[in-house]
Image (cartoon, coloured by chain):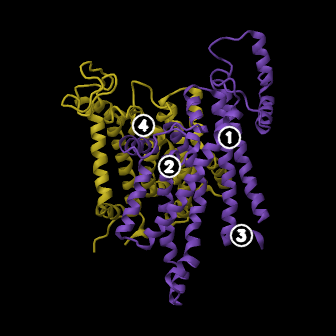
Chain colours: A purple, B yellow
Amino acid sequence: MYSYAIKRLLGALPTLLVLFTLSFFLMRAAPGGPFDAERSLPPEIEANLNARFHLDQPLYQQYFSYLEDVVTGRFWPSIQYSDFNVKELITNGFPISMQLGLAALLLALLVGCSIGALAALKQNSRTDYSVMALAMTGISVPSFVLAPLLVLVCAVWLGWLPAGGWNNGALANQVLPVIVLALPQIAWISRLTRGSMIDVLRSPFILTARAKGLPWLLILRRHALKPALLPVVSYLGPAAAGIVTGSIVVETIFQLPGIGRYFVQSAINRDYTLVMGVVLFYGTLIIVFNFLVDLLYAWLDPKVRKEYTS
Amino acid sequence: MQSRSLWADAGRRLRANRAATVSAVLLVLLSVAVIIGPMLLPWSYDAVDWEHIAEGPSAAHWLGTDQIGRDLLARLLYGGRISLMIGVVATLVSLVIGISWGAIAGYFGGKLDAVMMRIVDILYALPFMFFVILLMVFFGRNIFLMFVAIGAINWLDMARIVRGQTLSLKRREFVESAVVMGVGPLTIIRRHIVPNLLGVVAVYVTLTIPQVILAESFLSFLGLGVQEPQTSWGALVNDGAQVMETMPWMLIAPAITLALTLFCFNFLGDGLRDALDPKEQR
């Protein structure tokens, strides 16, 4: 198990390095520097700023001092919100984004796995077709179409739920954002679960269990569920990435004070440092999450586990 | 008994799939409408009708007009041109990169294969959408850059699929006989490997186009997509969402068109996969 963890870690590290390197050179290659604001600075101040952010050094030294800045969490100040630095904006917004994201991930797992399994058990029935139709809708309707439509119906026309705002995390304010975040993932997870469940139910060990006369529910619980859900575990990484991307849309539409909304603002305002900070932060988060999912998968899958413990 | 080719067989199975057939027909109609529609309309996508500003659907403007009096139908059709074009072109970009990468890695094998697939693995774990955003922020909005950037995200899947197929294809007799006859490896890849990948590629293309259209819409939503007065479906949906309480027609028509198009591509892709995959025969 440890050797597997080390191997996976060795896989995650180059990815982190590529993330960092690409972002560094993108930022360097961009036309204009971070201090080309509308007003031109006096030369002494510009020299000072350049020295502070190591812009006066040769490129390879800049690369390493930037690496040091990022690793030690010394983010550059945001250009747009000059009173805050990127780190403060991220630490303020992240708890909200994380709360919504985790709720959406849990909802997607619960609903996706159960309706996917249901569809597989009743393959080619009406239940199956309606689950698959729902899944197709979840895949085909982008969140920035779904969110305004839901607001229009549930908030504006019916008045059941608030149209937006955080309201200190009131439950009613979280319902619509979480649903919008979860729906595309419900769609993918249910398709995945249905496919793998159908495969598993056809496999010899299930036939054996049935031939031995075990009750159907026991077979499902003890023999079918775990192998059928393994592909879902490996989908957790992409699901998290999808939820992060979705949160950018959802936080903007529902006006939630998470990271995503700052991100959109900073993208529109060309706030280089803030965009950079969020990309590095979320990129690292997703890579680390993928690493943890890999470990979980190895722990669950006897084939991988055995290869590394024996 | 008459023999049937793979493609005739697949075509027969595809026609039996009603959802896929309807989707294909709808997509053809939509493409025709998007290509010739703007020429038939009395309004161009950026023309302002001062008599009808911010009005709902009427005889003069079938889908209504926006806040500055531009015909929504004209803008919808024009935006469709952009969205579909980005979908097709970016998919072709990813196709070219993905097929070459996967076929070369799979055919030559060994160390080259290991290194090339390791690179794919590393890139695969990167949140690429964020890099497209960085690109658009740093280098400004540029349709050409967008094609390349979105295409560059999507080639990884293609490379993996093509490599797997190539690995099994290169052991087949017709490849061996080509090797024996002294045909060079790049010619073999071009003449014998790639044509046999077309089935997989066709499925992949129909499933990638909607993803690319989605990615472009997402960028437009962030304000990083095409620039006014040009538009795309994503940009129209975004504009509509901002005024949906007072002008719901601005949201409804583009939202339905975008979702319907994505629906059709996904249904067609699923149908093609079922038709070309003999394992799924029922």
The nearer-to-camera label among 4 and 3 is 4
Q: Chain of mark 1?
A: A
Horizontal side, residue A262 vs residue A216: left or right:
right
Circles 1 and 2, Cβ within 8 Å, touching? The answer is no
The nearer-to-camera label among 3 and 1 is 1
**Labels 4 and 1 positioned on one and the same chain:** no
**CA separation in Å, label 4 and label 3:** 45 Å
**Mark 1 highlights which residue?**
A281
**Labels 4 and 3 positioned on one and the same chain:** no
Residue A11 place in picture, x, y as percent? 72, 53
For residue A119, the mark is none
**Mark 3 highlights which residue?**
A305
Nearer to me, A291 or B106 = A291
Location of residue A121 with respect to B6 vertically, above or below: below
Nearer to me, A89 or B203 = A89
**Mark 2 highlights which residue?**
A175
Any part of residue B104 in sight: no
Horizontal side, residue A294 vs residue A216: left or right:
right
Q: Earlier in the sequence, mark 3 or mark 2?
A: 2
- The secondary structure type at the circle numbered 3 is helix
**CA separation in Å, label 3 and label 1:** 31 Å
- The secondary structure type at the circle numbered 4 is helix
Location of residue A284 with respect to A34 vertically, above or below: below
Q: Chain of mark 4?
A: B
Q: Earlier in the sequence, mark 1 or mark 2?
A: 2
The nearer-to-camera label among 3 and 2 is 2
**CA separation in Å, label 1 and label 2:** 26 Å
